[in-house]
Structures are given as structure tokens and as C-alpha cells.
Image (cartoon, rainbow, N blue to C red):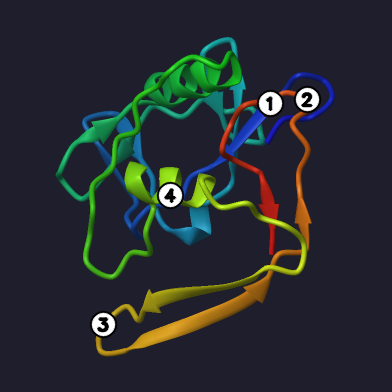
């Protein structure tokens, strides 16, 4: 999300983990899911304190600088890398390119009915979400040419 003063904010959701190992702080969980401000290449909490890194349950470390670099590249319209550690029970974070391309081939108009299947966290059943396209965004502004922010359901 970008404010009018060219400040960019991101929300990061992590697994519920909080520890301090070897002088480096790692954070996680919804209780710590605040917004980080990208400021001069260093991600900062709302109170101004710098964050040193994020831990993904031992699977790797994503530094604040890497997050900041991805944000800056996205803001400039350049390609960037998404680091994704899939875990059972998570909602889809990464969408297949084929699904995006197929949905972009559809002529979306207000009033079009949509339906999406979503598995429960324990994968025991599928819930169907239904909606109606309310608005289609125009090809103007900073998202021009991007597949994102095109529909409001």
C-alpha cells in the first residue's frame, strides 16, 4: 500500500513464532503482524525500530532488506522474486501463471457472477464462495498494464 507521501507499507503474516537467537530477533504470528515501512532500504516497524529478519520455522531466513528490495522493484514496475514456503493449511498465496492468464482472457463486466472453491485448513471439506463483479478498474495510474487490482467482487 502506498500513501500520498510516497511511503510504501506492506503487511507480513508469519507463523506464531517469537524468539531472539544470537542477537538477531525473529518475529512471527498475527499478534506481530503490523505494517513495516520501507525507508531507505531498511524495513521499520511503526515505532521506528529496525527489524533484523524473519524466521520461517527453520526453513530459511528472509531479511528485511530482501523484502524492501522486492517492494522497491515492484514499485518501479521491475520483476522481483517472491520467497514462498508452502505449509499445509495455508490459503493460496501463489497463483499459477496459467490461472492468471486464463482469467485475463475473460471479458469481466459488472454483474458477472464468480465462484471460488476454498479448502478448510484440515482439508476435510471444500467451501464455495460466490460473488458478483461490482467494478472493473480502468487502465490508468500506477497499476496500468498490471493484472492486479482489476476487479472488485
The residue depicted at 68 percent of the width and 26 percent of the height is 144
Q: Position of residue 82 (x, y in %)?
A: 35, 33
The image shows residue 14, relative to residue 25, as above or below, that is: below
Q: Which mark is first along the chain, 2 or 4?
A: 4
Q: Position of residue 152 (x, y in %)?
A: 71, 57
- Mark 4–mark 2 Cα distance, whole angstroms, equals 24 Å
> Would you say 64 lies left or right of 107 here?
left
Q: Pick the quarter of the image with the N terminus.
A: top right
Q: Crowding near pointer 4: few (<14 within 10 Å), some, many (20+)?
A: few
Location of mark 1 (residue)? 144
The image shows residue 84, relative to residue 134, as above or below, that is: above
Location of mark 3 (residue)? 122
In terms of image quadrants, where is residue 2?
Answer: top right
Q: Crowding near pointer 2: few (<14 within 10 Å), some, many (20+)?
A: few
- Mark 4–mark 3 Cα distance, whole angstroms, equals 29 Å
- Mark 1–mark 3 Cα distance, whole angstroms, equals 39 Å
- Mark 2–mark 1 Cα distance, whole angstroms, equals 6 Å
Disc 2 to disc 1: CB gap under 8 Å: yes
Q: Which mark is first along the chain, 3 or 2?
A: 3
The residue depicted at 78 percent of the width and 37 percent of the height is 138
Label 4 SS: helix
Q: Which mark is first along the chain, 3 or 1?
A: 3
Between label 2 and label 3, give the one nearer the viewer. Answer: 2
- Mark 2–mark 3 Cα distance, whole angstroms, equals 41 Å
Location of mark 4 (residue)? 102
**Residue 141 marker:** 2
Amino acid at each position: 500500500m502506498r500513501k500520498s507521501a510516497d511511503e510504501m507499507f506492506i503487511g507480513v503474516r508469519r507463523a506464531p513464532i517469537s524468539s531472539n537467537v544470537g542477537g538477531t530477533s525473529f518475529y512471527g504470528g498475527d499478534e506481530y503482524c503490523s505494517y513495516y515501512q520501507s525507508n531507505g532500504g531498511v524495513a521499520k516497524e511503526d515505532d521506528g525500530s529496525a527489524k533484523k529478519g524473519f524466521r520461517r520455522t527453520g526453513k530459511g531466513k528472509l531479511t528485511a532488506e530482501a523484502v524492501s528490495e522486492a517492494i522497491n522493484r515492484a514499485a518501479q514496475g521491475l520483476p522481483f522474486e517472491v520467497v514462498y514456503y508452502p505449509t499445509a493449511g495455508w490459503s493460496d498465496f501463489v497463483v499459477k501463471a496459467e490461472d492468471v492468464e486464463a482469467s485475463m482472457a475473460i471479458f469481466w463486466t459488472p454483474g458477472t457472477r464468480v465462484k471460488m472453491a476454498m479448502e478448510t485448513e484440515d482439508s476435510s471439506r471444500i467451501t464455495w464462495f460466490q460473488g458478483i463483479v461490482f467494478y472493473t478498474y480502468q487502465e490508468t495510474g500506477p497499476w496500468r498494464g498490471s493484472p492486479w487490482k482489476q476487479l472488485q467482487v
